[in-house]
Image (cartoon, rainbow, N blue to C red):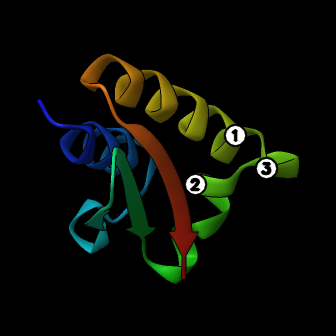
C-alpha cells in the first residue's frame, strides 16, 4: 500500500461523502506532497477541533512515509 492509498483510506473513513475524497501526489527528490481534497461539508471532520484530526493525519502520514523511505507532506485543500 502506497502512502497515497493510506491517506485515501483514512480520509474516506472520516467523511460522510467518501466519493468526494481525492488525493493528488507530487513527487520530488526523496519527498512526496499529498494534496487531500474533500467535500466542503466534510472539511470540519478532516480538520477536527483546533486542528487535532489534521495533525493526527499528518503524523500518521509522516510515519508511513518514513517506512516507505520518503518525506511526506499533507496539504488539506477545500
Dot 2 alpha-carbon crowd within 10 angstroms: few under 14, some 14 to 19, many 20 or more: many
Q: Quadrant of the N terminus?
A: top left
Q: What residue is shown with label 2? A: 46
Extreme residue toward the right, this view: 50
- Give how far apart the Cα atoms at labels 2 and 1 are: 10 Å
Q: Nearer the viewer, residue 40 or 63?
A: 63
Question: Label 3 crowding class (10 Å Cα cut-off): few <14, some 14-19, many 20+?
Answer: few
Mark 3 to mark 1 CA distance (whole Å): 6 Å
Q: Position of residue 68 (x, y in %)?
A: 26, 25
Is residue 13 toward the left or the right of residue 40 in the image? left
First in sequence: mark 2 or mark 3?
2
Camera-nearest residue between 13 and 23? 23
Q: Secondary structure at mark 2?
A: helix
Between the C-alphas of marks 2 and 3, the distance is 8 Å
SS at mark 3 in the image: helix
- Disc 2 vs disc 1: which is toward the camera? 1
Q: Quadrant of the C terminus?
A: bottom right
* Residue 34 vertical position relative to residue 37 in the rendered view, above or below: above
In depth, the one of 9 and 31 nearer the eye is: 31
Q: Is residue 23 above or below residue 29?
A: below
- Point out the residue furthest to the top here: 67
Q: Which mark is residue 55?
A: 1
Q: Residue at x 67, y 63 (%)?
A: 44
Q: Are marks 2 and 3 in contact (CB under 8 Å)?
A: no
Tell me the crowding category of disc 1: few under 14, some 14 to 19, or many 20 or more residues within 10 angstroms, Cα based: some
Kind of element beneath mark 1: helix
Q: Residue at x 42, y 67 (%)?
A: 35
Residue at the spot of label 3:
51
Furthest residue to the left?
1
Residue at 51 percent across and 51 percent down: it is 73
Q: x, y percentage for residue 72?
A: 44, 43
Whole-percent x, y for residue 61 in the image: 45, 34
Amino acid at each position: 500500500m502506497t502512502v497515497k492509498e493510506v491517506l485515501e483510506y483514512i480520509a474516506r473513513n472520516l467523511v460522510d461523502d467518501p466519493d468526494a475524497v481525492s488525493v493528488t501526489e507530487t513527487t520530488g527528490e526523496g519527498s512526496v506532497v499529498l494534496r487531500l481534497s474533500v467535500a466542503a461539508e466534510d472539511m470540519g471532520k478532516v480538520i477536527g477541533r483546533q486542528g487535532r484530526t489534521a495533525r493526527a493525519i499528518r503524523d500518521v502520514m509522516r510515519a508511513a512515509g518514513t517506512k516507505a523511505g520518503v518525506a511526506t507532506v499533507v496539504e488539506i485543500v477545500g
